[in-house]
Image (cartoon, grey):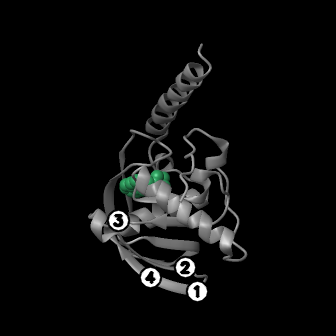
Amino acid sequence: MALLPIIIAPDPRLKVKCDPVEKVDAGIVKLLDDMLDTMYDAPGLGLAGPQVGVQKRLLVVDTSKDVDARDPKFLINPEILSASGELFKYEEGCLSLPEHYAEVERPARIRVKYLDRGGAACEMEAEDLLATCIQHEMDHLEGILFVDHLSRLKRSVILRKLQKMKKQQMQKAVGA
Ligand code: GNR
Ligand code: NI
């Protein structure tokens, strides 16, 4: 078990399109397990490769309410097969945009195909919060953050606040 540092926006590493995973080998399995530990520790409902500096198409999610009934899902090379016309609105947060929240509307139900932690080809259906989280994580694989679904003004306010916070933390770290 290892906790990985989470990259905070604005950062160019959160803006890149990720590459497919070629082979689900021991290194990928270890990375997924470390990502899950990092997500539970944060705590968060999901975590995608680029948030821990890995530009690969993989993510973890767990929207179960109870820590005693955890239900982690590992999705490698996920693709959306279909999405409902009906939308679901949820106040989203992101571990890469700490302390900022905003409502985003996305399809309420999706069908996704992916490789699981064992490398097996799978399909699943998700709705409401789980569907929202999977779409939020899949956005990360395209270099998209939830603020990219907001107005330019709302997005720039949030990103400027985070930029300022990062600058202050940097100055504190060097004792300025
Ligand atoms: O912890 C998280 N909560 C959340 C809430 C609503 C919609 C998506 C999410 S995912 C987020 C963790 C994260 O940043 N994943 O990329
Ligand atoms: Ni996120």
Q: Is residue 57 above or below residue 38?
A: below
Q: Please name the residue that numbered disc 3 is placed on.
A: 63
Q: Could you tell me residue 60's position as x and y percent?
A: 49, 65
Inter-mark Cα distance, 2 to 4: 11 Å
- Name the amino acid type tagged 1: Ala
Mark 2 vs mark 4: which is more N-terminal?
A: 2
Q: Please name the residue that numbered disc 2 is placed on.
A: 116
Q: Please name the residue that numbered disc 1 is placed on.
A: 120
- Image mark count: 4
Q: Quadrant of residue 73?
A: bottom left
Inter-mark Cα distance, 1 to 2: 5 Å
Q: Quadrant of ligand 1?
A: bottom left
Badge 1, how many Cα within 10 Å: few under 14, some, many 20+?
few
Instruction: Evaluate if marks 1 and 2 touch, with contact meaning CB atoms under 8 Å apart.
Output: yes
Mark 4 vs mark 3: which is more N-terminal?
A: 3
- Name the amino acid type tagged 4: Met
Mark number for residue 141? none
